[in-house]
Image: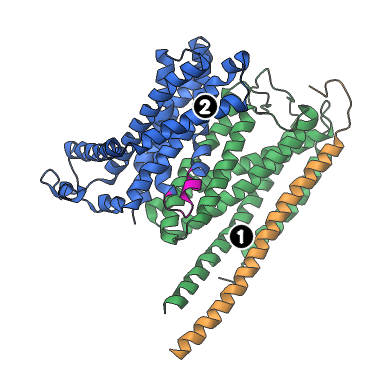
Amino acid sequence: MLRSNPRLKLMTVSSLILIVLSMYMVLIYAPREVIMGEIQRIFYYHVSSGWIAALAFLVTLITSIMFLATQNERHDHIAISSAEIGVIFTTMNIVSGSVWARPVWNTWWTWDPRLTTATIMWLLYIAYLFLHAGLEDHDRRRHITAVYGIVAFISVPLTFMAIRIWRTIHPVVIGSADPDAEGQFDMTARMTTTLLFTVSTFTVLYFTILWHRVRIQSLFEYMSKLQHQMYND
Amino acid sequence: MMNSPVITMKSPMYNNDKHPTTGQYWRTVKTIIWKDLSIEMRKKTLISALFIFSVMVTLVFTFALDLDKSTKDNVSVGVLWVTFVFSSTLGLNQTFANEKKHGSLEGMLLAPIDHTAIFVGKFISTYIFVIIIEIIIIPMFYFFYGISLFSPLFLLIVLLGSFGYTLVGTLLTSIAIRTQVREIMLPILLFPVSMPIIIASVQCSNAILSGANWGQFSNAFNLVIVYDIIFIGVAIMTFEYLIQE
Amino acid sequence: MLLENSQVDTSNYLLLGFTILTIISAGYCIYLFNRFSKLKQQISKTEKLNSIHNKDA
């Protein structure tokens, strides 16, 4: 279990290369947006991290359901790992949005429906991590966090739909936007390419980190079992 | 101890059949509700404590927000919902604490009954307490803030909103009692999950009380209903996994 | 919008944003790495203790 895995190494190296390439795409290949200027470039990472956060929470939902159905510990490891990574990506999403909003909306933060639902989602999965840390009995913990992982997912489609249901100032770049939206722009072909590239980069990055994180989780459970054995012999 | 629950459970109306009929299921639910209500009718601690608590929350808000006539109209519905949320959370903490204290939850789990019946029973009894609290709070708000809250549509949204809140609350309380710090864990788990329904209920209530037409709050109203329906399904499907030892 | 028809230079904000994103992601990677190496140590220690324990028995 402790030996290094060549496939994981390959994935780690390729995601590092992809990140450097995506930096090139975002900073040089993509054109400068006329009205917003340079700050618009953060949009590529903002959208990508948002999408990956949603993907990560979806993975948590699916593995939680699968854990309850099959009782296979492996699914529980993936669920908790994916939720933790999702929280990190949501943090990146919120921070990058906030930095963008300062020059464009003239404020760091506003209680717009999209921002509110994203915050709720973030808090929910932090509560999930808290719950995971607060339960000591491992077998019981797995069932309980799986149920909470299912319950928490309600916030994800809500966050996705928020800019489409309510009146909001948050721009909708893909699909039709609310007339109140501020910071709206039309994507050129180069912008679309760059966005697709960063989203794919982040997807590879997500699966790489997930793999590492699941490994750590399995090692952790293995160690708990070892210690348990030792004290009970 | 002649009429302890264990003896009741073994009485002829429960056979050891794994699949009880609908009649038996609802009898179990009724027994659990009746148990909670009769405990409360004898002790009267929960309702009176919640009453005092909600009066105090109202007063604290009145002074903290320094309410004059114009701000009163804007914030009173929000204050009303916050009072509901706080007192329901306290109530939720209490109903399961009683079960835990005397080990009666284990007793119920050992009985040959469908486990979701326990959930439905606990949920309905908690919901009854919440409704009683709301019956006390709403006239109190009319008294303190002078806004008329007695429109049927508003009362409907209060019932639907607190339905969803209590439903998720009952589910998450059965999670929170497993942790070391359960009194703190319940709000941490519950507030973010219930935020959509609280926000939608507040929007609806504001719209209804300011006399808006249906089109202006139909989105929020639908969200409340969808939320209620989703969590009925989630609760019934997952409760089994939460309480098994 | 604040920037409508004006050519304000927003590259400082971009730099700030990139710095924060780097700090978050690098911080998380370092956290994972630390956790991994700590676990590795603990496991080899526990395994050693276990084998000694088993020999005695």
Q: Residue at x 15, y 45 (%)?
A: B14
In front of the other: A43 or B22: B22
Q: Residue at x 39, y 40 (%)?
A: B170
Residue tagged 1: A212
Specify how the rendered protein is coloured. by chain
Which residues lie in the magenta part? B177-186
Q: In the image, A217: left or right of B169?
A: right
Amino acid type of the residue tagged 1 in the rendering:
His
The C terminus of chain B: image quadrant: bottom left
Which one is closest to the eye, mark 2 or mark 1? 2
Within 10 Å of disc 1 (Cα), the crowding (few <14, some 14-19, many 20+) is some
Q: Note whether A164 is above or below B113 in the view shown.
A: above
- Within the magenta stretch, is there residue B184? yes
Chain depicted in green: A
The Cα–Cα distance between marks 2 and 1, rounded to whole angstroms, is: 50 Å
Residue tagged 2: B58
